[in-house]
Amino acid sequence: VMAMAFTEAVAAEENPSREWSFPVVVLPPKSGWESDEGKSAWLALKVVMEEANATRDGVAGRDVLFLKSQLPTPKDAPAAVDEWRKNGVKVVISLADSETDKLLVSATAADDMPLLLANGEWVSLSEENDRPFKNVFAFDLYYPFRAVALAKYAAFRYKGATVAIEADLNDGQMYPAYDLLQRKLKECGLTTMMIWHNPARRVPLAEDEASSAGATILISCLGPRNLQTTWRRVKEKHLPLEVWYSGPFLPSMPLSLEGLLVADQAHPATRGESFDELATRAWEAERKKVTDRYYAVKARAAGLCAVEALKTSGGKSVADAMSGVSGIPLGDELLDIDKTTHRPASRKVALLRVSEKGLALEHIVEVRSSEVPDSIGPYTGR
């Protein structure tokens, strides 16, 4: 099945000789190639491919050929990876969801064929010795980056303040973020106070305890439901506390959580002129509009990273070359792959304030991937 899918993908394009090209397999977003996300990503990749191949020397004297693949099932992932390897695939790019990415990491970890996750926020790239797998890379910071971003913003905005942290020792979803948050707040010179979540506790409640101690901010390291309960009680009591959240603002969470502060790395990625430039080139080349900004810029960045690694390596030891790629445009920043983390050396992170109109940008901080170790522990709550 995978061999057929591979052949069909080649035939679907202009079918240059495989012998003279570097094949790069691309897996679609979870919604598939026919969705807005998939179509936008593919348009971006076609622009990258056509521009790379149009240069005098091409890509180390060859063409690069991006090949559409379908998402393999959990059972088929190892066989798919084996098939790609046999077909001489030089790089695998994934735009897929975290569950698919985890399967791919498992299937390719002992391989030399590079796996580049266009996302990777929820996927650890770390081996047991805390080093990343030699051939696995990702464009996102690991999920506890929010703890670092919130600590940096707290230090910037409230120097010398007391920050209360509400956490649950038994919550495997959020505990790693709490641990990193507390350390970073202390490093930034802020006083922290811990409030351990206990559903059976009646008084004092977390917000009362924080307010009585003179805290300015209450950061919740709990799940979305407990966060909403804390936020509601702070509002009802008119307490002089800001409520911040160390987890992701999920689509299921209501915009009525007015004033809540969250950190997000996707927001900066969609800003800047690079998308407008990409949309113009896609229209000129294909007469098609790019409709999904996020997947277009992520696909373009992944495509450019693969092309640079192939140019540098000439198709040999591509993973080693990828660990040194730099200057990849994403939003209004240029990404350099960090050799020690296999993620960008740094990413811009947006601090967003929730209002009924949506999420409003309040501030941007820079977070280094070395500040967010992959070994911090897996996220178990998605």
Image (cartoon, rainbow, N blue to C red):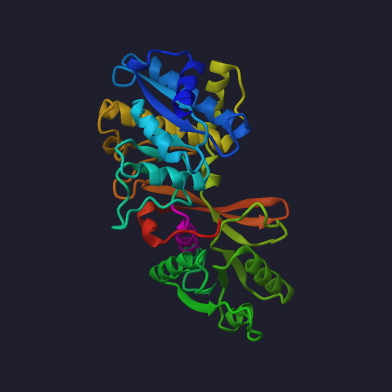
Q: Position of residue 160 (x, y in %)?
A: 47, 73
**100 or 231, nearer to the observer:** 100
Quadrant that contains the C terminus = bottom right
- Spot the residue most to the bottom: 203
Q: What residue do we see at 60% from left, 37% from top?
A: 31
Principal SS element in the magenta part?
helix
* 242 lies left or right of 325: right
Tell me if residue 345 can be seen: yes
User: In the visual, does 141 lie left or right of 207?
Assistant: left
Above or below for 237 versus 279? below
| Residue at 48% in and 28% down | 1
Point 29% across, 46% down: residue? 339
Q: Is residue 226 left or right of residue 314?
A: right
- The picture quadrant where one finds residue 220 is bottom right
Total numbered labels placed on residues in the image: 0
Q: Residue at x 59, y 82 (%)?
A: 209
Residue 193 at x, y = what percent? 50, 78
Q: Nearer the viewer, residue 324 or 362?
A: 324
Q: Answer whether residue 338 is magenta in the image.
A: no
Of residues 169 and 344, the one drawn nearer to the viewer in this rendering: 169
Q: Left or right of 44: which side holds 17?
A: left
Q: Is residue 276 above or below residue 149?
A: above
Q: Estimate the x, y position of residue 21 in percent, counting from the top left.
A: 35, 19
Query: Residues in magenta?
Result: 142-153
Q: Is residue 305 in sight in this rendering?
A: no
**What percent of the width, then of the height, locates residue 123?**
45, 51
